[in-house]
Amino acid sequence: MPDVRLASAQGRWILLTTVLGSSMALLDSTVVNVALPAIGRDLDASLAGLQWTVNAYMLTLAGLILLGGSLGDRYGRRKVFVVGVVWFAVASLLCGLAPNAGVLIAARALQGAGGALLTPGSLALIQASFHSDDRGRAVGLWSGFGGIGAAVGPFLGGWLVDGPGWRWVFLLNVPLALLCVPVALRHVPESGDGRAHGRFDVLGAVLGAAALALVTYALIEADWITAVLGVALGVAFVRVERRRPDPMMPLDIFASRQFTAVNLVTLCVYAAFGGFFFLSVVQLQVVSGYSALGAGTALLPTTVLMLLFSARAGELGERVGPRLPLTVGPLLCAAGMLLMMRVGQGADYPTDVLPALLVLGLGMVTLVAPLTATVLASVDTARAGLASGINNAAARAAGLVAVAALPLIAGMGAEAYRSASAFDAAFGRAMPVCAGALVVGAAIAFVTVRRPEPGCRRPECRVHASVAAPPLEGDGAAARRRLGG
């Protein structure tokens, strides 16, 4: 039974370790965006090359993250987390030394594989270690600091690009790993799923990753034959997972309607975030004339808001239930992205940029911690790695598709990022698409997400806005029988 208290020394070490590890992956998801114009100039890359610089990482992360969660459940979450941190650091070193765009893209794919090991492990370690009374606040703090890591990425990336150069955007991960690994080995308890076995769904992992790769390629290159093949492999992936006795993604986890609904919300929300952060820092540099550091600094209000209010948002979600924050949060984010359409050539920061980012930041504060807590609350503690993996896969896949599809939808040419007028016009077409995805996510949350009624024993009724209490004994036994344990 998890019994570590957040106020204890061990609790603080566990939180520090998980934040450090997840921040490496989250930082890399955003810090690279602000460096894209510099990477394009230095390596003579086209817009497609820049898209692949982002998406090669997201592709392997999204495609393998389910396997990473399963590995942690079966072989030990701390062990797999530490392996992921080391792998990520080595791949980051290769990125920093890349002589051309092809090598950089390949190294980014290796980076994503390391992220697939450490990302689900960080949240699963919190779920498996902390006492149930402290998990809601622990998840809120993890979400808040992780969100800060993602939000501070553009600022940090800009400082590095304008200073020692874009290669240090990747090399920064090496000292973070050197700090994280010894703390994890010394202070974080090992945990796993006692029902797990040593067999792995390699076919499912290959089909899932290949489907994402083909769809991504099809969107970037506008190749519809490849898109059809990607969809076909996606269907094959679902069929394989349904029939295997040991699937990478057991479909019975979707017996909770709440879990399914919140993952649909995740798809909508993180598609919008992925598209926004990919395009906005380029818009500020190419169109509004900001330096890399200036563009990164411009996004700091979201960081400040996440720092100040994320933990309180997690506690508020516990009191009012998940429906309200998961509805209001995306709508606020959508309003912020629509306000970003005012940011063009000669944009004034106090009147054009800042209001949009304040509204966006308030939406992120309202949304992120309750979303994470609600996902984890819908499954048994023993399957925390799997649930975290599925939700992270949904988030990364959504961002992956958005980065691939938005330039196509917005009509960006191969050299659009070199022309202020062309990029500005495409950015103005892209922001309503991102806002629309958020509105759809809010509608799904409003219609489907509910606080369970007292005494309800159906799978979806285990969910509430904090992290779940221990599952009902009958449900746990049934799950073990379905898994053959």
Image (cartoon, rainbow, N blue to C red):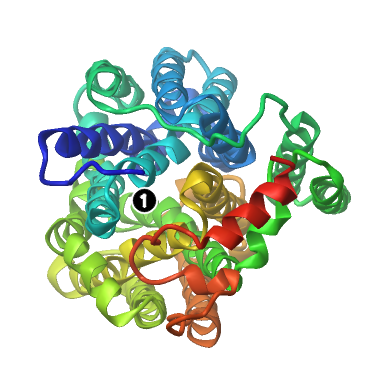
Q: Residue at x 79, y 39 (%)?
A: 207
Is residue 9 shown left or right of residue 299?
A: left
Image coordinates of residue 239 in percent, x first then y, are 86, 51
Q: Which residue is drawn at 79% across and 47% down?
A: 241
Residue 91 vs residue 186, the one in the foreground: 186
Q: Residue at x 66, y 66 (%)?
A: 255
Image coordinates of residue 441 in percent, x first then y, are 51, 75
Quarter of the C terminus within the rendering: top right
Is the residue marked by circle 1 packed among few (<14), some (14-19), or many (20+) residues within 10 Å? Answer: many
Q: Is residue 466 above or below residue 60?
A: below
- Residue highlighted by disc 1: 286
For badge 1, the amino acid type reads Val
Q: In this view, does 310 lie above or below 151?
A: below
Q: Is residue 366 above or below residue 122?
A: below
Residue 330 vs residue 34, the one in the foreground: 330
* Residue 290 can be seen in this image: no
Q: Which residue is drawn at 19% across and 27% down?
A: 163
Image coordinates of residue 228 in percent, x first then y, are 87, 53
Image coordinates of residue 168 in percent, x first then y, are 29, 22
Snapshot quadrant of residue 90 = top left
